[in-house]
Image (cartoon, helix red, strand yellow):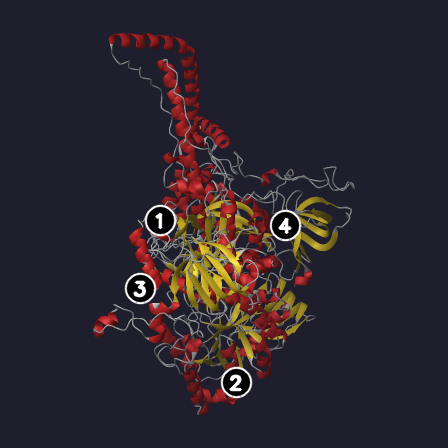
């Protein structure tokens, strides 16, 4: 998960820096780093899996390829009524040129004295000499880097949706966004440098529904612009579900303490919850398989019937003559003419549509990641063991307080862990007990891809994510790993790396202009670009 | 008791009517008397031009045939003169959840239900509405649903729902605000699934039919005879939304009766009253309506907090019905200061058509809400329109109620003074040409004000002595009573009422 | 049981409530610390500074000091600061600091609940906190006297540092006295009008008070109460609107800020920054172990992000905090004669990303690796 070495150097392509006027581009633009796009890729598995039975795997993957081409999609588009955003809001197609002394394209890739051209929300050009177009605004900055992403957030989510314990697999957090009353929270988060977040509702229930990836620009309170992905992931949680009637109360240090309920979760509850997660994925896989099989059976049947139809049409004249003879004979005999029975194969039955299983099918196929909030090491081990056979499943673990015990497996399978570096005390016990501030550093040192999130319980904690990242650095995480976790790592895990996460050609202009290196305490963020427009300027501070 | 709620005149009329005519199931209401009356009032506010001093309204067969000054009318017409009073069109309650047995069902999608099976004609609610001068009410199911039932527009007089009906099947209630047990995400999911299921069902039915036709063709080919002619007894899918092709193959009566009303919605045949309690719900409602082709038939029923979505509503030019809470109070999350917003003013400024709902039947009825608007700076015309003409427009009855103009229903309310004044009383009410309410003979009102016991009440039974009957009818042109009628029947708060947070 | 034995032992060794003298049986060899940047605890910092420590006490501080031969030299390529001071905590004493049956107990002392072996202290030590104030619970009107203790070595720096007064709604009860502000203030007036023992020392100004308040009205009430009885000391509780800052400044009281949550409202943070900029002396409470000890530096980081200068933040954690607790003669600064409580950081301590490399208490290495 470090910066890729095969990134083309900016000096290679001849179009940069030759004084050529910025090219007019239509979305989509060719992506600089193909590894950043793994959404819907049929081979989108980041690690090589052990191939047990080659033959069936080949057949299966070819079936799946066909299925993905023919798959039944939900009615209308994935988010009916709202076109998935194309070019960002262009009511104000402003053009900016930023002259940076240091441009941190992604952690580990730094360019000196570079300029960035932003137009209509996108980064159109990066190079040492960019001419200032007419009407463009020029800004100077010491350091320019990608803005931060919070991959575990509750910002903008309606309180009722956060507390909902009965979310279905197909229920979307994107439908439960309340973007009208959160301007001040958005503004504070933007000022801290966080411009986008994966938001998830329903964290208290076993199934949390589909999360959304949103951009935090308060001027874009139309979901069409704010929501980058209405279905960024499917989330489930293990260990603190309230299905036994428990209620939670927020404590001063940010933990949620169960204050009523018949008994706390025990090991067997967790085992059964993990089994539920695994069997959900299995159900999704079975659903997709049933769909694919149906498609094949249907095709076969249709071909057979078409053949039969041709046959019947060819034989019609003869059949008609025979029938006329029989009718005549029956009339002569004074009997009723009985028609001959016609038999044919029954049309195969379509599997009943189930939107929840369809969502699980997407998870089993690896189209969207499955985020499971799980903490205890036994539960994590069970989860890893149970999901090993789903070769396409993209698992992400949230929380992972005792994940260190399974660090090797996690590293080998490349399963990211979203860590919440929280300042919890020791007096109250909850699922997070056992998580220390050094968890992120220790996991990263063991080779596990680490992401940093703000816990997804309260909307106001997203603002402090950069500070929590600094805390994690102070307790063992490498600074560059922290920056990567907040930018390209989070983007890649949730399939938005083709749009945000680094300062590269073609991506949306979500970036920061600072007077020093990012994540340093005395560095002031001067400008925050969100969707290509400066949402925060020095005058705001 | 039941008979005494009408004035003496009307009582006679009812008796005559009921004796003379048989009740039919016709949707047109039976006139109680012949529906002919001439009203002369000191001031006639028509809401269709300037007010007329000493004007005359001529109503024949329940419809207004003429309004003006010095108008000729038939010599045998019944004439009512109120030289010191104000004649005003009956108020239009654009949306109410009262007067029914239960305003909400337990099931999520109840589109096949109809309020006509639930309206209680003798409910106090209708009686009280008449006392406040409300002559047209759009009775709809409440917002505690995903898709509710079909509503009716009624007048508050009549012994059966058929008699009360002004316009049947006025629209279906839907809710973007989550019903209990759901959150906004799951509510939106349920809405989406309702229409997805409908589409899937229709496509399934069409496919089955097609398969059946194909099978029949092959069977005929095999058997050597000509296939039967297929006659499509259905109609193709209409409307502006998504379409299922070849729906004409299915006769409409074959479509599941539980799904048929939903199909009517998608085809744009039914108005939709969409409940919203937060601005986010407004987005959901508009999105759902757009996706399924009924945005042009949608009326949003908003709680006070939805004023923040006014721009969005204006953008799509959707009419709205505001809740009875007109002032939205909220606390600034950063400074902690309270902020009050007068909601109708917001919509007036943005140019969105809106109607008001009463907050209670007698004390805070429609006149009160309109008066509040004037108090907050709106003009009389704007405020009065929201409870009469605009309300009629929004509910689809602009050619029948809302103002006193030839051709419209003869719904006239006689006020002792300015309709918006707290000092005025509703003295008389004429509904479709029938004089159905006279304050001087309003038994319950007199009980409140003078202590006169109504006949056959428990009080009378206790003391054992029959009370005096009501005083002979007086033309009530005296100064209006002080004070309010304190009886507040608050049975119209079922369903969604989002009070201040 | 253990607590009781310890209490007896401590009472035997340290009778009364006089200041505890510096230990004599400490490390005799001279140690020299050389660090790239040394924060002195009074708001200033010295680059390439050398600190000489002998007998657990700082003997010399300066940039151009020659390191005497025979001294153990520790060179640190980072920042060095005095040990951090948390001005309110219940570490190791959860439940032991709340006398729920008696609401007025001025003679109670938190030091009897001091359990230095408890692992809460090592957690605090690990993040650079060397001194804590154990405070009685604010649920009592007069909860007793706070104790200033060190997080390693078991030393009580000051056994009766402040008199804890609960002037907030936390001190009110449902079913027993007091149930209202009026009743609470009445009782306090009674106690202070005829003061005995510790209360009389507080009323005279020789024993500082620590007044727990939650909101603006309670703050003003506390200020008025302190003015009435000439009390010196500090307010504990900092969430109020900025218009109370002038009143606090005028009263001469210090402020111990309540620990911030992650996602703390900007109003609370701005109040603290406003207090500091107005010249009010501030320190930070911790409320551990309900909170993580890193909340101390986190709170400062929030304030620095919203405009507090880093040096003022450093001062609030060290020198000013010691002054508020009344122990500025012993801890809180790197100055001659004070205890050698030093923390070696990888970078500036106000930065959350800096790590604790080593902690020295009374000149002894108690946490972290060798340099």
Left or right relative to B197: residue A150: right
Whether labels 4 and 2 belong to a single chain: the reply is: no
In which quadrant will I find the C terminus of chain A? bottom right
> Residue B392: percent from the left, percent from the top?
49, 54
Do labels 4 and 3 touch, CB within 8 Å? Answer: no
Nearer mark to the viewer, of 3 and 2: 3
Report which residue position mark 2 lands on.
Answer: C224
> Residue B15: percent from the left, percent from the top?
30, 57
The tag on residue A531 is 4
Q: Between marks 1 and 2, how big is the CA–CA gap? A: 61 Å
Which sits in the foreground, B303 or B15?
Answer: B15
* Circle 1 Cα neighbour tier, 10 Å, few/some/many (<14 / 14–19 / ≥20): few
The tag on residue B4 is 3
Whether labels 3 and 1 belong to a single chain: the reply is: yes
Q: Between marks 3 and 1, how big is the CA–CA gap? A: 39 Å
Do labels 3 and 2 touch, CB within 8 Å? Answer: no
Do labels 1 and 4 touch, CB within 8 Å? Answer: no
> Residue B340: percent from the left, percent from the top?
53, 67
Query: In this orientation, does residue C111 appear?
Result: no
Report which residue position mark 1 lands on.
Answer: B107
Return the chain for callout 2.
Answer: C
């Amino acid at each position: 998960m470090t910066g890729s070495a095969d990134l083309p150097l900016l000096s290679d392509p001849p179009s940069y820096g030759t004084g050529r006027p910025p090219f007019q581009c239509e979305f989509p633009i060719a992506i600089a780093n193909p590894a950043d796009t793994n959404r819907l890729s049929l081979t989108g598995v980041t690690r090589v899996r052990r191939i047990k039975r080659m033959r069936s795997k080949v057949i299966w993957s070819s079936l799946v390829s066909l299925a993905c081409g023919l798959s039944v999609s939900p009615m209308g588009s994935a988010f009916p009524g709202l076109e998935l955003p194309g070019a960002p809001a262009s009511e104000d197609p402003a053009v900016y040129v930023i002259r940076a002394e240091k441009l941190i394209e992604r952690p580990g890739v730094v360019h000196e004295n570079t300029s960035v051209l932003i137009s209509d929300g996108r980064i159109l050009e990066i190079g040492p000499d960019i001419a200032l177009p007419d009407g463009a605004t020029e800004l100077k900055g010491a350091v320019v880097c990608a803005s931060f992403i919070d991959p575990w957030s509750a910002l903008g989510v309606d309180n009722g949706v956060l507390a909902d314990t009965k979310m279905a697999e197909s229920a979307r957090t994107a439908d439960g966004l309340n973007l009208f009353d959160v301007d001040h929270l958005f503004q504070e988060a933007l000022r801290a440098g966080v411009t986008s977040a994966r938001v998830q509702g329903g964290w208290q229930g076993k199934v949390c529904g589909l999360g959304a990836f949103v951009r935090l620009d308060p001027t874009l309170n139309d979901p069409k612009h704010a929501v980058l992905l209405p279905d960024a992931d499917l989330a489930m949680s293990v260990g603190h579900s309230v299905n036994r009637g428990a209620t939670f109360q927020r404590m001063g240090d940010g933990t949620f303490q169960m204050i009523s309920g018949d008994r706390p979760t025990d090991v067997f509850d967790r085992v059964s919850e993990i089994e539920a997660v695994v069997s959900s994925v299995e159900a999704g896989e079975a659903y997709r398989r049933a769909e694919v099989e149906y498609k094949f059976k249907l095709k076969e049947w249709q071909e057979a019937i078409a053949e039969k139809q041709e046959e019947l049409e060819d034989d019609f004249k003869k059949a008609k003559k025979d029938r006329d003879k029989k009718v005549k004979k029956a009339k002569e005999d004074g009997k009723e003419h009985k028609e001959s029975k016609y038999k044919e194969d029954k049309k195969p039955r379509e599997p009943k549509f189930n939107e929840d299983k369809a969502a699980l099918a997407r998870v089993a196929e690896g189209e969207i990641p499955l985020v499971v909030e799980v903490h205890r090491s036994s539960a994590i081990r069970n989860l890893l063991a149970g999901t090993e056979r789903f070769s396409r499943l993209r698992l992400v673990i949230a929380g992972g307080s005792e994940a260190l015990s399974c660090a090797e497996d996690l590293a080998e399978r490349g399963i990211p862990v979203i860590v919440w570096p929280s300042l919890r005390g020791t007096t109250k016990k909850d699922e997070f007990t056992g998580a220390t501030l050094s968890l992120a550093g220790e996991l990263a040192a063991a080779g596990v891809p680490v992401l940093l999130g703000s816990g997804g319980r309260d909307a106001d904690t997203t603002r402090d994510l950069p500070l929590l990242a600094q805390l994690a650095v102070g307790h063992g995480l490498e600074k560059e790993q922290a920056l990567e976790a907040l930018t390209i790592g989070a983007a890649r895990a949730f399939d938005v790396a083709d749009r945000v996460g680094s300062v590269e050609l073609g991506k949306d202009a979500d970036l920061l202009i600072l007077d020093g290196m990012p994540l340093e305490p005395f560095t002031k963020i001067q400008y925050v670009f969100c969707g290509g427009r400066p949402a925060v300027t020095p005058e705001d501070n | 008791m039941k008979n005494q709620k009408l004035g003496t005149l009307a009582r006679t009329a009812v008796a005559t009517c009921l004796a003379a005519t048989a009740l039919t199931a016709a949707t047109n209401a039976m006139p109680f008397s012949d529906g002919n009356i001439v009203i002369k009032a000191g001031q006639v506010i028509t809401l269709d031009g300037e007010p007329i001093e000493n004007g005359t309204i001529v109503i024949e067969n329940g419809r207004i045939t003429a309004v003006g000054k010095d108008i000729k009318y038939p010599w045998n017409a019944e004439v009512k003169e109120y030289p010191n009073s104000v004649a005003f069109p009956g108020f239009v309650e654009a949306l109410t959840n009262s007067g029914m047995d239960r305003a909400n069902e337990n099931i999520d999608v109840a589109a096949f239900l109809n309020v006509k099976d639930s309206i209680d004609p003798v409910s106090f609610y209708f009686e009280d509405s008449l006392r406040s001068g409300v002559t047209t009410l759009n009775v709809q199911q409440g917002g505690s649903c995903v898709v509710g039932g079909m509503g009716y527009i009624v007048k508050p007089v009549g012994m059966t729902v058929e008699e009360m009906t002004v316009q049947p099947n006025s629209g279906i209630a839907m809710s973007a605000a989550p019903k209990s047990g759901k959150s906004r995400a799951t509510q939106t999911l349920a809405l989406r699934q309702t229409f997805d299921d409908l589409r899937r069902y229709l496509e399934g039915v069409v496919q089955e039919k097609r398969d059946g036709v194909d099978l029949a063709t092959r069977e005929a080919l095999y058997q050597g005879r000509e296939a039967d002619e297929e006659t499509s007894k259905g109609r193709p899918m209409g409307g502006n939304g998504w379409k299922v092709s070849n729906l004409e193959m299915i006769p409409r009566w074959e479509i599941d009766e539980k799904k048929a009303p939903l199909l009517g919605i998608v085809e744009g045949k039914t108005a939709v009253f969409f409940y919203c309690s937060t601005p986010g719900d407004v987005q959901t409602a508009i999105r759902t309506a757009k996706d399924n082709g009924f945005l042009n038939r949608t009326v949003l029923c908003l709680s006070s907090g939805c004023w923040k979505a006014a721009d969005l509503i204006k953008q799509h030019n959707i009419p709205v019905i505001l809740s009875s809470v007109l002032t939205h109070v909220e606390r600034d999350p950063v400074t902690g200061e309270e902020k009050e917003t007068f909601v109708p003013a917001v919509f007036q400024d943005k140019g969105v058509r809106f109607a008001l709902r009463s907050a209670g039947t007698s004390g805070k009825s429609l006149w009160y809400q309109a008066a509040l608007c004037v108090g907050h700076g709106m003009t009389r015309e704007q405020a009065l329109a929201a409870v009469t003409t605009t309300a009629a427009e929004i509910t689809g009855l602009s050619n029948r109620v809302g103002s006193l103009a030839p051709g419209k229903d003869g719904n006239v309310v006689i006020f002792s003074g300015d309709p918006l004044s707290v000092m005025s009383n509703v003295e008389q009410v004429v509904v479709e040409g029938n004089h159905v309410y006279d304050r001087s003979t309003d038994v319950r009102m007199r009980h409140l004000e003078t202590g006169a016991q109504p006949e056959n009440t428990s009080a009378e039974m206790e003391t054992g002595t029959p009370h005096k009957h009501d005083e002979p009818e007086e033309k009530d042109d005296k100064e209006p009573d002080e004070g309010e009628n304190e009886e507040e029947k608050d049975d119209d708060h079922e369903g969604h009422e989002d009070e201040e947070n | 049981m253990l607590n009781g034995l310890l209490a007896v032992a401590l009472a035997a060794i340290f009778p009364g409530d006089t200041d505890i003298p510096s230990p004599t049986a400490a490390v005799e060899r001279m140690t020299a610390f050389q660090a790239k940047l040394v924060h002195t605890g009074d708001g200033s910092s010295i680059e390439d500074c050398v600190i000489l420590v002998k007998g657990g006490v700082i003997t010399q501080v300066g940039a151009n000091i020659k390191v005497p031969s025979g001294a153990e030299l520790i060179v640190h390529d980072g920042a060095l600061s005095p040990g951090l001071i948390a001005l309110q905590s219940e570490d190791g004493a959860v439940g032991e600091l709340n006398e729920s049956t008696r609401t007025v107990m001025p003679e109670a002392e938190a030091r009897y609940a001091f359990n230095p072996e408890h692992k809460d202290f090592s957690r605090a030590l690990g993040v650079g906190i060397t001194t804590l104030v154990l405070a009685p619970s604010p649920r009592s009107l007069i909860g007793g006297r706070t104790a200033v203790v060190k997080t390693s070595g078991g030393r009580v720096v000051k056994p009766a540092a402040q008199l804890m007064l609960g002037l907030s709604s936390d001190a009110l009860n449902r079913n027993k006295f007091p149930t209202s502000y009026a009743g609470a203030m009445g009782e306090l007036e009674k106690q202070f009008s005829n003061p005995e023992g510790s209360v009389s020392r507080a009323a005279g100004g020789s024993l500082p008070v620590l007044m727990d308040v939650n909101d603006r009205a309670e703050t003003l009430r506390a200020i008025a109460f302190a003015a009435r009885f000439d009390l010196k000391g500090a307010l504990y509780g900092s969430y109020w609107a900025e218009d109370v800052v002038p009143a606090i400044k005028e009263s001469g009281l210090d402020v111990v800020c309540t620990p911030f949550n992650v996602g703390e409202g900007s109003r609370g943070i701005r109040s603290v920054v406003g207090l500091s900029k107005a010249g009010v002396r501030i320190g930070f409470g911790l409320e551990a172990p309900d909170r993580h000890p890193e909340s101390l530096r986190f709170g400062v980081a929030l304030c620095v992000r919203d405009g507090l200068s880093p040096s003022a933040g450093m001062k609030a954690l060290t020198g000013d905090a010691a002054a508020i607790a009344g122990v500025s003669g012993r801890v809180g600064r790197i100055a001659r004669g004070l205890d050698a409580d030093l923390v070696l950081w990888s970078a500036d301590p106000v930065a959350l990303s800096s790590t604790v490399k080593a902690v020295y208490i009374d000149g002894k290495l108690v946490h972290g690796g060798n340099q």
